[in-house]
Image (cartoon, rainbow, N blue to C red):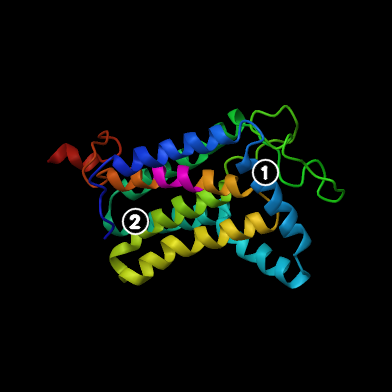
Amino acid sequence: MVRRPRSWGLDLAVAAAFIVLSALLVWPSAVVELDVHLRDLSDANRPQWAERIAVNTNKLGQGGLLGGLALGVSAILAHRLRTVRPMIAFLAVYGMTGSVLVVKYVLTRVYPHWPDPATPPYADAEQSTLFTVLEPAGAYPSGHVLNTIVWYGFLVFLLGSHLKTWQRRLVLLAPPVIVTFSTTYLGYHWLTDAAGGFLIGVVIIRLVYRIRWDTVELPTWLEPEKRYL
């Protein structure tokens, strides 16, 4: 089983790291210049075979696919356990994951291959900061990387008792690393977009692990059998 976090220390540290990272992206800092350098380096070293591999591995972070898988597992568990609680947990995770869209809307940032992937030159350091008025501007943070933290973490939460320790670690660690590399290498996101998605994802999944889903109070209409207890 997944251990319930005992302290809020890591959560606060990760939240603070996200704030610091975001602050460093407000102006053309060295961090922004690193993003641009990595974008240009990747563009100059992307043979067709490597691009094909990156495109396919990047699919590990597709929210629709992962959310559908999590929904299916939650529904099966709800049916077998005769309780709606796995579905309630899924809906809560879905809502928290979707909240990243609000962050994207507030912290506007252009994508690495702005304005047109087919026609360089692309965004420079001055153009790729936060709070840009350029469009489209929904790069920060990376939803794909956030998905790998939250949805794979949720699947481990649901199925952890059926997995060995090394299997849980593999599921939790491999997808974020792979998608961070692929989404940066392909120029879908800046490296710091991936870092931002990672940090928010950690906060969300630790909150999910912290909630006692088996005992949290639910209204009677969701658990009508409680009327007879």
Amino acid identity at mark 2:
Phe
Where is residue 227? Give x, y as percent.
17, 37
- Hey, which residue is sitting farthest front in the picture? 30
Mark 1 or 2: in front is 1
Q: Nearer the viewer, residue 29 or 4?
A: 29
Does the magenta run of residues contain 76? Answer: no
Where is residue 146? Give x, y as percent.
51, 48
User: For the point 54% across and 35% down, which residue is it?
Assistant: 22
Q: Is residue 33 left or right of residue 165?
A: right
Q: Earlier in the sequence, mark 1 or mark 2?
A: 1
Q: Nearer the viewer, residue 130 or 228?
A: 130
User: For the point 42% across and 67% down, which residue is it?
Assistant: 170
- Helix, strand or loop under label 2: helix
Amino acid identity at mark 1:
Glu
Disc marking residue 33 = 1
Tally the numbered discs: 2
Q: Which residues are magenta?
A: 198-204
| Residue underneath mark 2 | 157
Asked whether residue 84 appears in the rendered view, the answer is no
User: For the point 34% across and 50% down, which residue is it?
Assistant: 86
Q: Is residue 1 left or right of residue 150?
A: left
Disc 1/disc 2 C-alpha distance (Å):
38 Å
User: For the point 26% across and 41% down, which residue is it?
Assistant: 223
Choose top left, top right, bottom left or bottom right for residue 160: bottom left
- Helix, strand or loop under label 1: helix
- Quadrant containing the C terminus in the rendered view: top left
